Amino acid sequence: MTPDPSASPEASSRRRFLRIAGMTGAGWLLGASGLTLLETPVGKLFMPINDRLDAWLLNPQKPVPEFPVSAIEPDALIVNTFRFTPTIDTEKFRLVVDGEVHHPLELDLAAVYRLPFTSMVIRHVCVEGWAAIVQWGGVQLRDIFQLAQPTEKARYVYFESADGYYGSWDLSSAMHPQTLLAYQKNGAPLPIANGAPLRLASPIKLGYKQSKWITRVTLTNQLLPRRGYWEDQGYEWFAGL
């Protein structure tokens, strides 16, 4: 089998540097304004070439190598707040899962906590240029989807947060085994400042894709005009690592 040059450590490091610099993949050559074919014939939405290339490079089932617990950097994770830190009544909290699913859900935290627990020690990478090795614990997002049963039309996942933040992912990235709805950080309950009761955590996306204080997960058949708070201001949509 011919080795995949994009899988080498050197290529991976170069891709990560270019991505953080805003010059990922084909976007490095053509710029962020480069456009491909229509994303969907109905929505007539365009996707930047570098997003399309990153999606093509993703192996949606291949785990990213993790770090030992001894490598955790407890003080390195910077708290970035979008608007404000919301106040959430955990007794009344419900995670809504709707859209292109056969079984819409409204899960309280007890129901989420009963699902299989997954823990990982990964590097959280911010587009601002800093990174932190963090342990996240929670439920694989794909376990939530297994309960909701996405329809054949489902292709994208939208996330709404209690502070008004919003974002979207491709379904393949959301189904990655290391994409979690996390409720634990560094072996302790997730602090409210870091997104409690539930936040996204994954080693395959930049930090601005990892929404905090998630209240709703909606599956769609097309990418909607409001793709994400930062993406709507020109940030890369796919934002993969």
Image (cartoon, rainbow, N blue to C red):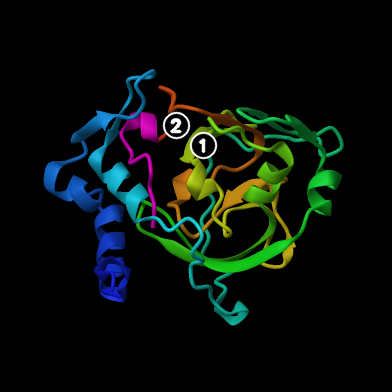
Q: Residue at x 79, y 53 (%)?
A: 115
Mark yes or no: residue 68 visible.
yes
Is residue 159 left or right of 130 when viewed as pictured?
right
Is residue 136 left or right of 11 when viewed as pictured?
right
Q: Which mark is residue 125?
A: none
- Pinpoint residue 191: horizontal percent, then vertical percent: 70, 53
**Which quadrant is home to the N terminus?**
bottom left
**Which quadrant is home to the C terminus?**
bottom left
* Residue at the spot of label 2: 229
Whether residue 206 is in magenta: the answer is no
Rendered image quadrant of residue 109: top right
Q: Residue at x 37, y 39 (%)?
A: 237
Q: Residue at x 45, y 52 (%)?
A: 205
Is residue 29 left or right of 193 when viewed as pictured?
left
Q: Are marks 2 and 1 in contact (CB under 8 Å)?
A: yes
- Pinpoint residue 217: horizontal percent, then vertical percent: 63, 34
Q: Residue at x 53, y 41 (%)?
A: 81
Q: Which mark is residue 82?
A: 1
Note whether 123 is above or below 207 in the view shown: below
The span shown in magenta is 231-241
Q: Amino acid at mark 2?
A: Tyr
Q: Secondary structure at mark 2?
A: loop
Q: Nearer the viewer, residue 2 or 75?
A: 2
